[in-house]
Image (tube, coloured by chain):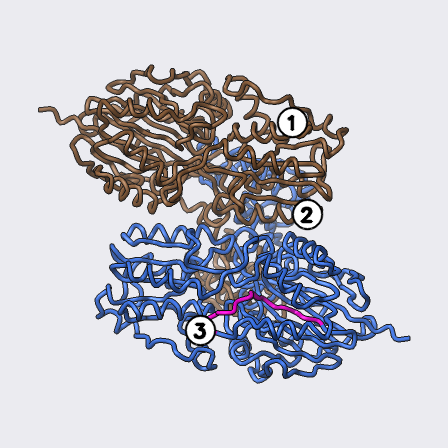
Chain colours: A blue, B brown
Amino acid sequence: MSNDRLIFVALGGAGEIGMNTYVYGWGAPDKERLIVVDLGVTFPDMDSTPGVDLIFADIAWLEERANQIEGIFITHAHEDHVGAVGLLWPRLRAPIYARNFTAHHARRKMQDRGQDPDKVIEAPVWPETVKAGPFTIGFAPISHSIPESSAMIIDTPAGRVVHTGDFKLDETPLVGEPFDPDMWGEIGTSGVKALVCDSTNVFSSQPGRSEASVGPEIVKLVNDSRGMFVATTFASNVARVKTLADAGVAAGRSVCLLGRAMRRMVEASVTTGVLTDFPTTISPEDAESIPRENLMLLVTGSQGERRAASAQLARGRYMGLELAEGDTFLFSSKTIPGNEKGVIHVMNAMAEKGVDVVDDSSGHYHVSGHANRPDIDRMHALIKPQMVIPMHGEYRHLRENARLAESNGCASVIAPNGSVVDMTGKQPKVVEHIETARTYLDGDVQIGQFDGVVRDRIRMGLNGHALVTLILEGNEPLGDPWVELSGLPETGRSKAPLVDVLEEDLGQFVGRAKRKTLSDDAALEKELRNIVRKSTENEIGKKPEVTVVVSRLN
Amino acid sequence: MSNDRLIFVALGGAGEIGMNTYVYGWGAPDKERLIVVDLGVTFPDMDSTPGVDLIFADIAWLEERANQIEGIFITHAHEDHVGAVGLLWPRLRAPIYARNFTAHHARRKMQDRGQDPDKVIEAPVWPETVKAGPFTIGFAPISHSIPESSAMIIDTPAGRVVHTGDFKLDETPLVGEPFDPDMWGEIGTSGVKALVCDSTNVFSSQPGRSEASVGPEIVKLVNDSRGMFVATTFASNVARVKTLADAGVAAGRSVCLLGRAMRRMVEASVTTGVLTDFPTTISPEDAESIPRENLMLLVTGSQGERRAASAQLARGRYMGLELAEGDTFLFSSKTIPGNEKGVIHVMNAMAEKGVDVVDDSSGHYHVSGHANRPDIDRMHALIKPQMVIPMHGEYRHLRENARLAESNGCASVIAPNGSVVDMTGKQPKVVEHIETARTYLDGDVQIGQFDGVVRDRIRMGLNGHALVTLILEGNEPLGDPWVELSGLPETGRSKAPLVDVLEEDLGQFVGRAKRKTLSDDAALEKELRNIVRKSTENEIGKKPEVTVVVSRLN
């Protein structure tokens, strides 16, 4: 009897929101043929990852099995799903499949990292499919906040798996394919083994609102505004960008796109045909000569990013354009947790210029791209799966989605990153835990989360740094120890310069030190370090990081 | 004719939420007699102030005028109003006035920093007053989210100033004095020159809700819960703590306070008489032996602070108590911007233990302590001031409150930190700008925001640190340069250890360097630094901070 099994494992995205990296396998244990769904990134912050450029899943487990991979399938073009394609492809070297618009972005990701964009293959739309080893995969259109988002319909020898990707149930998404309940009902009718399901908004108890509900509110706001109207949103939310631009044109305003991502995303949408009737835009140079009450800027920087157009405008002139008293600035977006201070900073800088800043605290100017609890419920009901595996959520979201599934009569399991789920039987079972972690792109280098590099940076950032150098000839000190400080107060309790106090204390120690200590590098370094830490704590109340360099001439 | 004038200046709190520090003056220009209202702190974060312990206003301007200060008046016991009293008093040395409960906290702040708690004088409650030079100051009870909050009624030769402090209009605050519209109307009837007014919630368009509205919702939640019920809130919100405890007792649960701030705040409230009927609590030791369905814990850590009780419980056993499957944890609080990630982290850790985490996203379990827009409006109407000076808000809040005041027929001016406002005439006028900044408590040392200490730490935290040592005898290098790295990847492009690559490059340079370079410390250091930065960038794509130590033997 065959011991082939169907497995699912998240390397990223389950137990967090970001860096989605999912793997399905079919075959004998540890000989499974594999497919990868999404290779996303997440973003660093000063608290835990200072100086890091990007974060993605540690794919060591997958890399060891690179020759088992039949293909990489990208659900949609958000950074947390496609962002690591160019960085990780050289370690996996399997064909990448994505629909037209997504493929456009995936190719750019490959190019940006010096990889061959032709490894990205345009996938057909469901009901057409792609064969990949024992799997047959269909890209089924599903509504989200970016065009051409797709769920993966994965037919396997053990039955059908529906991997929702990010989704909402929007029958009027304005750009991209509407949610089609008939198609989804049909996908479910032949029996679905597992629904692997977006959990992001499982705590939102009201049904999600359509993208179309935002337009009338924005039109009202634009019509009521006097000076220049400036709006920001996620550039990838092409429907929203279009809604904003349409509202501007309807109010007799010329529309100008500011910020690379905004221009690129609209271009990509037009090039790939997902956007057919975007209004004509003008260049920043032309915008300069248009009366501000006839102008609308659509800009990058909804998260308060320092280098984006919104922050640049908040600081001063940008591309020849400048905010002024009486202008309106709309954040048609939500603030992602962790970005609040940056957004608030930009808002206040704008308020200082006399700009009326409008955000979504009223709930009128933004809708989420994810299914709320009743929508997830409806998806469970449409697909009628044997089991639901929650994904795309923090642990609390996975747990809640699993509970919801069970209340709907489905089997379920909470499977955060690294849990290998065996879906072959009627009940999903976690059969193994593999080590997962994060990989940091630091400059050009990929380093491990636990390499200690970032930990050392955090310590220096928190505690400051003291450097001690001591030169010995044989075992005889040549002069006193020398101290250099960085990131530490200049003076403390004794009012004398801290560096003098430390050199004095170290000099006294070296003057009195026994030959045995002076002849032992490790002992000497330890003593010098301890003196610096103790004396500094005594002077200023905190202990610095210390580097000791003992140079021995002979 | 006298040129005496009445001035107002914020050194902290206007243009930010935090570190409230306000000054009023009466007299000839720059000879004014002064009073200080509040000496608060704000809290550091990793983004801008890594390693800093506390932040408060730079009081250099005030310190130079210490002999003009008649008194320091504290409106209420929140950290952003009283937190810097002990740290700054030695530089001001004026008597501190506060009502009983606030004085209790101010005395502790003095003691904590080795100052004499008897400098804190208990102030009587309005209509009694305190004389301080040309000022007569009354502490008028006003509702907020901590007991005994008071507005300052400041009578001056130029007329009456009402400094609201933090306030809401709550006629059923449960603990502390209810808002008394009659008293406030009366304070306004004799004519008020200026209302210096809390602006925090000016963008909240609905009238604020009473503390009393939270109780029934909490009772319902507690009654519906099965396992242990744990709740956190701001410890200083004594009314909320009581509401929670009462709900616990009503549901037959024993109540245990966890976390120092929680125990201290309840003790202080009982000691000072603001809390008369708090339920009996039990110790953590006793709690261990009580069935969890009969237990309620009230814990510190509503902001996800790593060392608070909530985070400790999320990680594991704390004080003999442990969360388990089926317990409920309530955040009866809002998350202050910047703390989102910490709170989310705690929530997920609890979810992993099977705990049902409830936050205030429903709007049922928390109310704000600040007046919303309609309440501010009502305050303007009750007091009928000549002018409104907005305070306690970011710039956008000050601007909006000023606009609201003007729409109510009051003069107004936006006066962020450092703006000296002359209130003598009918219109407030900004007549001067004084330099303001932040002071950091770093360990035990007060350092200036612009001293460069924290900037250096941030740079090391972001970029890592490379150390180069070179020893010369006369102008002859003794051996090759030596490199130590901290917070940098071990290998880069060439796959050789980065430290080896750098030592190689530096060694080559030193071997070829001209006598002129080798004899010039500054030139040599510069060259070595540049080589390290360039070679590191070439290897790993980023430039580190570099310290070069050239030791010259002779």
Q: Is residue A447 visible?
A: yes
Count residues near mark 1 (Cα–Cα under 10 Å), then give few for <14, some for 14-19, many for 20+: some
Q: Position of residue B490 (x, y in %)?
A: 62, 62
Mark 3 in CB contact with mark 2 (< 8 angstroms): no
Inspect the image, locate mark 3, and give the three-letter code of the amino acid beneath it: Met
Whether residue B165 sits left or right of residue B484 in the image: it is left
The residue carrying mark 2 is A522
Which stretch did the figure color magenta?
Answer: A161-175
Mark 1 belongs to which subunit? Answer: B
> Closer to us: mark 3 or mark 1?
1
The residue carrying mark 3 is A265
Q: Residue furthest left?
A: B1
Looking at the image, which is closer to me, B526 or B123? B123
Mark 3: which secondary structure? helix
Quadrant in the picture for the C terminus of chain A: bottom right
Q: Position of residue B420 (x, y in %)?
A: 24, 36
